Image: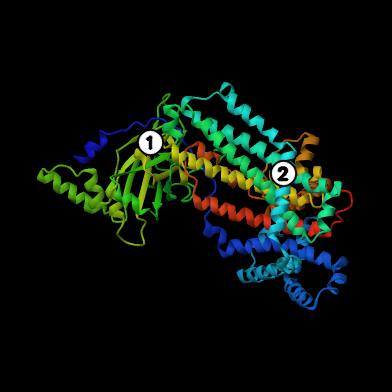
């Protein structure tokens, strides 16, 4: 009886396109602050500080050490001796980078530097991490010694001066470009009614990002060089002002102005987006979904972790087919294990589950027609045999079928329908009885509280899914569109933009302590852009780019050879490929020092109506500040060693 009822239910999901594709897990504070992350940070920064320490000591540092006070000299000597293991690692790494240029080099028998680092025992990495910490403290020793002299009053005075100078430079005129977009953007930005919010959010954040980053780079890159050229900085340093106070004061002044501008632009952009929102767009994106994600794995597919591969270039999603790969192997399944569920879900009559799947068609099918999937929700207390016996007993006694709430509460089972029809990349939803979450609160601890199983019902089609394509909604879905939550989410995305502004401003300011304004501007933007394209650099380093490395691709371009053809075994080609290996080793090492830029962009969250997690934002803030601390240390030493009265 129950089966017949389910067979008659085939929901047709309306296409609502709110898709969030996450290729990396959202950051958490525990991941950023665990020992492995801290050790990696120490090894990365320590590899530079120990090398700088060695070069400084060899060229002129040994003369300056003798002039230190006894206590400082003793501390520097101890820290220098503790830094020796990292110095040895630097020398070994530099030699390993150049291995492809050595005679009789065999790439089949020699592991890359990155692989060799991963093969080191854990205790060696721990020892090297403490040695790296010693080298960082040794380089920071001049700053630490002068730390008691630091005056926040002087820092605020320099910040106030920098704030006023930035206003006098009339950089605010650059923001009239954004004003034009807000006033006349609707004339030139076409969009469907359902895509209105998504389009406007993307355009507003794109305009804010370009203008604010360019202005911040220009302000920071030309501030100190202009002071040195006009010798106004010379008047400051003759007074009892520490060089680090100049650096921090400039940074604080510029960031204060840029923060005020960002607040104004965020408010203006939000008003522009919220005015005249269509009902379709409001239903889709004027909200901040709080998703609860599970852990995805597959059964009866080519890979338990990745599912079946259908040949798509973007391997973000794994696929399941509607038929078994081999006779007797069983129906392919995608299974989400929900190991942590908020207790608030058990107190609701229903909980919304949303999903966004991809369709890979092996036959043409019918136009504008979706694909059927099966979906079952079970808890750790679910017993299929017990449920079968209960149903048979009810059929014999003529009792009515179990209601969905009874199935969920007593047996830990819920199936919305025998087949659910969904559309390609549309957001579907299912209302799950809250009693299912009540049942999941108790039971065996070694099993996940809730398991969701998805199957494909059409034997000629494939359904693709990723971990973040299925989730439960922790927020209250009965409210529908929620302008207040959307506005707060928009503000959190602006905080991510603020971190990028801080990143560019600090880089340009630090570089300007030793380089000219133009060079500082170009280098800061170049480093920022390299951080933006880390995925391409990674593909280049591991050899996934078609045509080989940079020199090999250049050679193919000159000789007009296709990328898939293997180069002939000639002396010139061997030199080219070995040099590319050196470049790849260098790029692999360089990637450790590039900023994480893409993780600071939350535009996709806001435009698709997904909540930006506070832990994700806080973890990114911690990582950004940690990345900038060594740069500030570099700026301190550069400004300390430079003759500020000379020309830039």
Residue occupying the point 46% across, 28% down: 277
Identified at 18% across, 50% down, the residue is 390
- Residues 112 and 255: in front is 255
Residue 83 in the image: x percent, y percent?
73, 71
Quadrant in which residue 242 is drawn: bottom right
> Can residue 406 be seen at all in this image of the molecule?
yes
Is residue 534 at least partly visible in the picture? no
Residue lying farthest to the right in this orientation: 646
Give the percent coordinates (x, y) of residue 340.
40, 55
Q: Where residue 164 is drawn, which disc sits there?
A: 2
In this view, the residue in front, 433 or 399, is 433
Q: Nearer the viewer, mark 2 or mark 1?
A: 2
State which quarter of the image contains the N terminus.
top left
Which image quadrant for residue 122? Answer: bottom right
* Label 1 CA crowd tier, 10 Å (few <14, some 14–19, many 20+): few
Quick check: 228 left or right of 614?
right
Distance from the alpha carbon under mark 2 to that under mark 1: 46 Å
Name the residue tied to disc 1.
480
Percent coordinates x, y for residue 129 in the rendering: 66, 68
- The extreme top residue here reads 187
């Amino acid at each position: 009886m129950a089966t017949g009822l389910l067979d008659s239910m085939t929901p047709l999901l309306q296409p609502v396109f709110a898709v969030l594709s996450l290729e990396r897990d959202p950051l958490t504070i525990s991941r950023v602050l665990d020992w492995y992350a801290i050790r990696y940070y120490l090894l990365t920064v320590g590899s530079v500080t120990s090398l700088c320490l060695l070069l400084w000591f060899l060229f002129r540092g040994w003369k300056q050490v003798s002039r230190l006070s006894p206590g400082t000299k003793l501390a520097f000597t101890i820290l220098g001796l503790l830094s020796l293991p990292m110095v040895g690692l630097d020398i070994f790494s530099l030699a390993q980078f150049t291995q492809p240029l050595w005679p009789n080099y065999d790439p089949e028998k020699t592991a890359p530097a990155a692989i060799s680092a991963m093969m080191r025992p854990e205790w060696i990495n721990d020892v090297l991490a403490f040695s790296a910490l010693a080298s960082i403290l040794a380089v920071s020793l001049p700053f630490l010694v002068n730390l008691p002299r630091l005056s926040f009053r002087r820092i605020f005075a320099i910040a106030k001066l920098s704030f006023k100078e930035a206003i006098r430079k009339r950089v605010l005129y650059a923001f009239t470009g954004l004003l034009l977009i807000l006033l006349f953007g609707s004339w030139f930005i076409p969009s469907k009614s359902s895509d209105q919010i998504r389009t406007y959010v993307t355009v507003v954040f794109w305009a804010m990002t370009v203008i604010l980053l360019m202005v911040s780079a220009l302000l920071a890159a030309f501030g100190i060089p202009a002071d040195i050229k006009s010798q106004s900085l010379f008047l400051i340093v003759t007074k009892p002002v520490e060089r680090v106070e100049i650096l921090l004061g400039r940074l604080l002044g510029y960031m204060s102005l840029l923060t005020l501008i960002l607040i104004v632009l965020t408010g203006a952009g939000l008003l522009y987006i919220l005015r005249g929102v269509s009902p379709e767009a409001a239903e889709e994106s004027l909200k901040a979904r709080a998703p609860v994600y599970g852990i995805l794995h597959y059964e009866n597919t080519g890979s338990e972790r990745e599912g079946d591969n259908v040949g798509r270039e973007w391997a973000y999603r794994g696929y399941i087919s509607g038929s078994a790969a081999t006779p007797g192997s069983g129906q392919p399944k995608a299974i989400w294990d929900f190991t942590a569920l908020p207790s608030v879900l058990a107190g609701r009559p229903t909980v919304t589950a949303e999903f966004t799947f991809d369709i890979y068609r092996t036959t043409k099918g019918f136009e504008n027609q979706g694909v059927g999937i099966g979906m079952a929700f079970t808890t750790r207390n679910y017993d299929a045999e017990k449920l079968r016996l209960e149903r048979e007993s009810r059929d014999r006694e003529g009792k009515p079928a179990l209601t969905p709430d009874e199935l969920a509460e007593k047996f830990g089972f819920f199936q919305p329908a025998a087949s659910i029809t969904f559309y390609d990349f549309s957001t579907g939803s299912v209302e799950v009885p809250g009693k299912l979450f009540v049942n999941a609160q108790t039971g065996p601890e070694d099993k996940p509280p809730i398991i969701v199983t998805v199957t494909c019902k059409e034997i000629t089609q494939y359904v693709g899914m990723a971990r973040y394509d299925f989730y439960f909604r922790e927020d209250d879905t009965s409210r529908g569109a929620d302008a207040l939550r959307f506005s707060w989410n928009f503000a959190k995305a602006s905080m991510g933009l603020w971190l990028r502004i801080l990143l560019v401003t600090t880089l340009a300011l630090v570089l300007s302590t030793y380089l000219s304004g133009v060079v500082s501007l170009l280098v800061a933007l170049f480093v920022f852009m390299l951080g933006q394209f880390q995925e391409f650099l990674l593909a280049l380093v591991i050899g996934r780019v078609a045509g080989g490395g940079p020199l090999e691709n250049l050679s193919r371009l000159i000789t007009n050879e296709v990328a898939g053809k293997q180069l002939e075994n000639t002396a010139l080609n061997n030199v080219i490929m070995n040099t590319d290996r050196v470049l790849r080793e260098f790029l692999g090492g360089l990637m450790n020092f590039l900023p994480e830029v893409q993780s600071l962009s939350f535009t996709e969250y806001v435009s698709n109506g997904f909540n930006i997690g506070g832990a994700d934002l806080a973890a990114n803030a911690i990582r950004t500040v940690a990345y900038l601390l060594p740069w500030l240390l570099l700026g301190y030493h550069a400004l300390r060693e430079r003759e500020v009265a000379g020309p830039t």
